[in-house]
Structures are given as C-alpha cells and as structure tokens.
Amino acid sequence: MVFGNLNDNSAGRKPVLGVWIDMEDADGYKEKHGKPLNTANGSLYTQICRTFCSRIAGAGVYASKSVLADILSVSDLPIWVAQWASKCTYSGAYDLWQYSNVGKVDGISGNVDLDYSYRDVYSEQESKDTLEQILDHVASIDKKLK
C-alpha cells in the first residue's frame, strides 16, 4: 500500500506518506491460500510485517483495530489503524487513523477513505528506496505466501 502523491524532485520516486503493508484480507486471499488472518497465524503475519518494515526505511503496518489488538505483535512499528468510528479506541501508539470509508471529495465519484495523521510526514526523512524496489519486495513477500 503506497499512499500520497509521488515526489518527482529526486532521482527515485518517493511516496510522501511512506509505505505501509496492508494486513487486510478483504478479498479473502489469505483465507483462500490456507493462511487466514487469525490468532493461529499471528506469529507468521507478525514476522511478515517485521521483515517488510526492516527492509524499507520508515515503513509501517496498516490494519484494523482488531487485527492490531488481537493478532499482530507490532506495537513497536509505525501503525496506521483502520477503525471506522468517531473515536479510535486502539490502546497502542499509532501514526495514522482511518476513521471512515464514506468520505466525499470533489472530483471523485463514490466514497473515499478519510484519515487523520498524527505525524508531520513532510518533515520526516524520505525513504531511500525507490518505488520499484518497494514493489519488488512486496512481490517477493507475496510469493512466500503462495
């Protein structure tokens, strides 16, 4: 998951909001491949998150509040909590909070996600990895899950 506009002011393309591994299973991929996102597989998915974040400077984990609280052990990594509510009740520290999936933006038909950022992403050091390196790394993780 790469969020934000890409900045073309440097040799590589760098996502302004960083790179986040998305631990959702909305399409049932994990389930279909015999590795459902549940407590029994929590250590596997925790290790995948840790490996991803260790290879990409500044990378973080995007997941629902319940996955973060009940399945993964990643509270020491950058966290983006998805909890569609008026208040985020995740007890750990987090950098971003997705509070809605029914936002409206002029020029975009349909709903968009709405998020709060609790960090100044523009003053942080940008990742040295190019977008192509990030995508290659994500593909290698996907191969390991198959």
Image: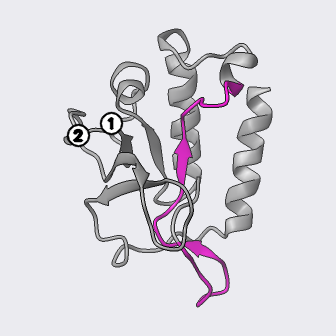
Q: Residue furthest top?
A: 40
How many numbered discs sit on the rendered protein? 2
Rendered image quadrant of residue 130: bottom right
Q: CA distance from mark 1 to mark 2?
A: 15 Å
Q: Is residue 15 placed above or below 22 in the rendered structure?
A: below
**Residue at (76, 54) in percent of width and height:** 136
- The prevailing secondary structure element of the residues shown in magenta is loop
Q: Is residue 42 above or below residue 58?
A: above
Residue shown at 46%/59% (left/top)?
58
Type of the residue with mark 1: Ser
Query: What stretch of residues is rendered in magenta?
Result: 5-29
Residue at the spot 72% in from the left edge and 62% down from the top edge: 133
Q: Would you say 68 lies left or right of 40 here?
A: left
Which residue in the protein does label 1 denote?
75
> What is the x, y in percent for residue 13?
64, 77
Circle 1 packing at 10 Å, graded few (<14), some (14-19), many (20+), is: some
Q: Is residue 27 left or right of residue 71?
A: right
Q: Residues within 10 Å of mark 2 (few under 14, many from 20)?
A: some
Q: Nearer the viewer, mark 1 or mark 2?
A: 2
Q: Which residue is mark 2?
A: 88
Position of 99 with respect to 24 (left or right) is: left
- Front-lying residue, 50 or 21: 21
Specify the label residue 93 is tagged with: none
Under mark 2, the amino acid is Cys
N-terminal of the pair, mark 1 or mark 2, is: 1
Residue placed furthest toward the bottom: 9
Secondary structure of the residue carrying numbered label 2: loop
Looking at the image, do the residues carrying marks 1 and 2 touch, with CB atoms under 8 Å apart? no
